[in-house]
Image: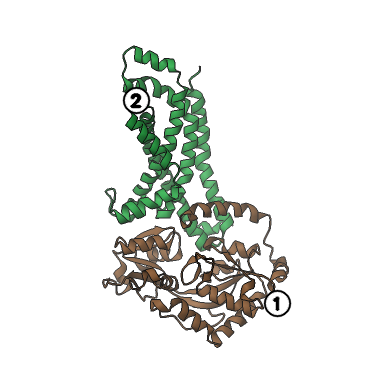
Amino acid sequence: MKLHTVTTAAAAALVLSLTAVGCGSDDGDDTSSASVVGTGSGDEKITIGIKFDQPGIGLKTPDGKYTGFDVDVATYVAKQLGHEPGDIVWKEAKSADRETLLQRGDVDFIAASYSITPEREKKVDFAGPYLLAHQDVLIRADDDTIKKPEDLNNKKLCSVTGSTSAQNVKDKIAPKAQLQEYGGYSECLTGLENKVIDALTTDDSILAGYAAQPEFEGKFKLGGFKLSNENYGIGVEKGSELKAQINTALQKMVKDGSWDAAVEKNFGPADYKNEPAPKIGVVVN
Amino acid sequence: MFDFLEGYDLLAAFWVTVQLTLYSAVGSLIWGTLLAAMRVSPVPLMRGFGTGYVNIVRNIPLTVVIVFTSLGLFQTLGVTLGADDFTTINFRLAVLGLTVYTSSFVCEALRAGINTVPVGQTEAARAIGLNFPQVLMLIVLPQAFRSVVGPLASVLIALTKNTTVAAAIGVAEAAALMRVMIENEAQLILISAIFAFGFICLTLPTGLFLGWVSKKVSVRR
């Protein structure tokens, strides 16, 4: 399935470009469409966009269940908005589709390792942030040649085509490193195991999710470098009143300890040193 | 409206696409012709190999072929094709994968062309004492090629668009840059439209030119 992402993304991009034109994205009428689905209570359905392919963050398991930190946060928030876990419809939100999904109203909110950036804030609103992640590297557990970010020069790094992490490596962190880009992180992990690749780089939360998978436990370790700040936010439609409600829910989640429990549950086995829960509305650059 | 294009080298990305297309086109034309020769040859073993190759390769999704060249050949078996940095290795692996895949379509197009050459031509050639390679190279293939310029143009256009799959193993061509731009700029529709337009600029003239060539060289019977 994952091998098809390139072709499907290209196809989807074109289809979306054709369909989305008809909808328009006039800021004025956005709130009305959001309130139809957003503010309901009781047993109404709520649609939430998550990643389906990132262990520890948002993963659809073969038996049709959903696991990960984003899933736990989204479930908690949905409950605070008055939706039981059974009323949640999970929808896959691939990185490139996220803004379109929100603008078209296909999902009520998105929690899919969605970093808050100025470009995205022009298109959608963000509640949160609910997690402060950093770009980091995943290396083989027995590799002791990489101790600081400078050691990455002349090493072979791997990341996902087009991702911000890959661009960061080329531009800033280790310009002399060789970079292999693949369609997904799983391909990088094969290379890391085979020693063709020395380090896999992306957000530490995603890396922790992979390292915590049962088949990889003990094989890889996190470098512990804070190469960038990624503020994960919950994306909502521009001007939606859901933003305030979600912020309240997130504050409550941190207060009653559910946030710490979710971090421990999803990233615990990877020995991941998480940042304390970020303050709502404070984006760390 | 288009200020987000600043800082991206679209031409360089499309140049890589063009290079991928040209190298793979030459490669698959040669290998596809050899395959077609095998499929019509009098040696059963060669016929069997040609038939098996075409039927297996053209039924495997291209993404699987391309990813296999990287994960299987490079990472696991250590095949580097004589290069030592990732950029060159990936480019060569992508050309290899595209050639392996596209040549099966070239072979089938060419075989259809061979069937348009009247049997009398082959019989006459054999009657004057030509052997099989001579019959094929002097009599049949020259006529076959002239009748399949149109179908081969379709294969070439498909190949141009198929090069986008090389982004899956990190070749910095147009589709890879498109992903970078979508990731950074949150302008899905505009960016996709620009890249779609870029591909039309590449393929439309190709199609028109080869259509004209096809009319020029076709064998009138």
Is the same chain shared between marks 2 and 1?
no
Question: In this orientation, which residue lies closer to the viewer: A236 or A210?
Answer: A210
Q: From where the camera sits, is residue B11 visible?
A: no
Rendering quarter of residue A222 = bottom left
| Residue at image mark 2 | B42
| Residue at image mark 1 | A42
The furthest residue to the top: B128
Percent across and percent down for residue A68 are 50, 73
Percent across and percent down for residue B182 are 52, 59
**Image: B23 above or below A105:** above
> Chain letter for brown?
A
Q: Amino acid at mark 1?
A: Gly
Q: Is residue A154 left or right of residue B219?
A: left
**Image: A34 above or below B101:** below
> Chain letter for green?
B
Q: Chain of mark 1?
A: A
Percent across and percent down for residue B116 are 47, 23
Q: Is residue B89 left or right of residue A84?
A: left
Percent across and percent down for residue A189 are 37, 64
| Residue drawn at x 32%, y 51% as measured from the top left | B73
User: Which mark is nearer the camera, 2 or 1?
Assistant: 2
Neighbourhood count class around disc 2 (C-alpha, 10 Å): few under 14, some 14–19, many 20 upward: few
Q: Chain of mark 2?
A: B
**Image: A161 above or below B166:** below
Neighbourhood count class around disc 1 (C-alpha, 10 Å): few under 14, some 14–19, many 20 upward: few
Q: Secondary structure at mark 2?
A: loop
